[in-house]
Amino acid sequence: MSDQSNRAAAEAPEAGARRRRSRFGSFELKLGLLIGIAGLFGSRLGQLWVAFDVFSQFTLQFAVLTVAFLVGNFLPRGRLTAAFVLTVGGIAAIGAWPHAMERVPAAISQLKEGETAIKLASFNLWYGNPDIAAIAAEVRRLDADVVTLIEVGPDKRAMVEGLKDLYPHQTECFADAYCHLAILSKFPIGETVAKSSWEGPPLMLVRLGGKARDLAVMGVHTIRFPHSRAQFRQVRALARFIETMPGRMVVMGDFNATPFSRVTKTVETETGLVRLTSLPTWPAWIELPQVAIDHIFASPDMRVIEDERVGRPTGSDHYPIVMTLALPAP
């Protein structure tokens, strides 16, 4: 047998092993890529069929999956491992995003003459949160001018009262069925409206006096998946109600919908309000929140002075969200 034949015989097992390594994970790589693309496609279908809107909640995760497995398909070796590592790293990066923002200066603009700065905070406390003292401490630490509290269960109502030294002006809707909202303010509160048993979501509306110059502030808590159709009906009713309110307005709360959702887009397009938030706020338990479902909307002539930040969850499944806006000069 010639030397050439010997070399070919020796190389044959190695070539076969290379082919087997190349084929290993091919099905999984294609499946992962297909799931990512299908998820992104499904998230856009929510604009046509409300039932598909749930996919929009995970648009970022589907994008990470798509990119990770697309890259994996083009690597010469270690393809499935690389795709997995990229997926985990991308999802971790989404969760690290709100924490990274704490290292960036919050101030992005200066007040102009005649403007009034209003610091806003929205915090879903979670009914099952037992750490009431930590909640109160976090509300004080945030030191917003106006705070919307959501899921204020009976065990937390004394805590709200205990904040009156910082927030002497308070209103709530605890006596109404399914309405567990409170609005705390450093500004005087004039008109108040509470709605719970109606076609829209539970809400609290106040008009602020003093330097807030009749600004309307609304706290909202919509229903969540799997009740997508009911949620969409709620936000349509909410939009119609907002349209009846004169003057400048801030709407904030737990919308159970991300910036990619038809729900948040409906609020914007049907009211003219501008969504100012995009940071993930839920779930807080793993400290790497994945979906941005807590939002602040405001009239388009209100400028952002300090960009959005998340606070500390203090036992809740949500991170509080806080930002400062400029109320235009009269």
Image (spheres, grey):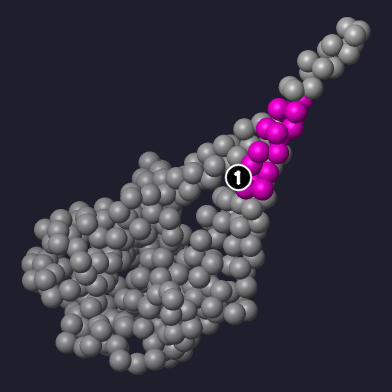
Q: Residue furthest top?
A: 3
Span shown in magenta: 15-29
Q: Is residue 110 at all visible to an observer of this figure?
A: no
User: Residue 150, located in which quarter of the rendered image?
Assistant: bottom left
Which one is in front, 241 or 14? 14
Instruction: Confirm whether residue 81 shows in the render.
Output: yes
Quarter of the figure that contains the C terminus: bottom left
Horizontal side of 175 relative to 81 (left or right) equals: left
What residue sits 56% from the left and 74% below the top? 52
Q: Is residue 27 magenta?
A: yes
Residue toward you, 330 or 2:
2
Find numbered disc 1 in the image and state the secondary structure of the residue it sits on.
helix
Percent x, y for residue 34?
65, 56
Q: Nearer the viewer, residue 15 or 129?
A: 15
| Residue appearing at x 24%, y 67% in the figure | 126
Residue 233 horizontal/vertical position (percent)? 46, 86
Quadrant for the N terminus, please.
Answer: top right
Residue lying at the far front in this picture: please name it. Answer: 1
| Between 143 and 139, the one nearer to me in the picture | 139
Q: Is residue 233 magenta?
A: no
Query: Could you tell me residue 289's position as x and y percent?
Result: 39, 54
- Magenta: main secondary structure equals helix
Q: Residue 6 occupies which quadrant of the picture?
A: top right
Question: Label 1 belongs to which residue?
Answer: 68
Please tell me which residue is depicted at 61% across the width and 56% down the height of the picture. Answer: 36
Relative height, residue 255 to residue 309 (above, below): below
Rendered location of residue 198, percent (x, y): 35, 92
Q: Amino acid at mark 1?
A: Ala
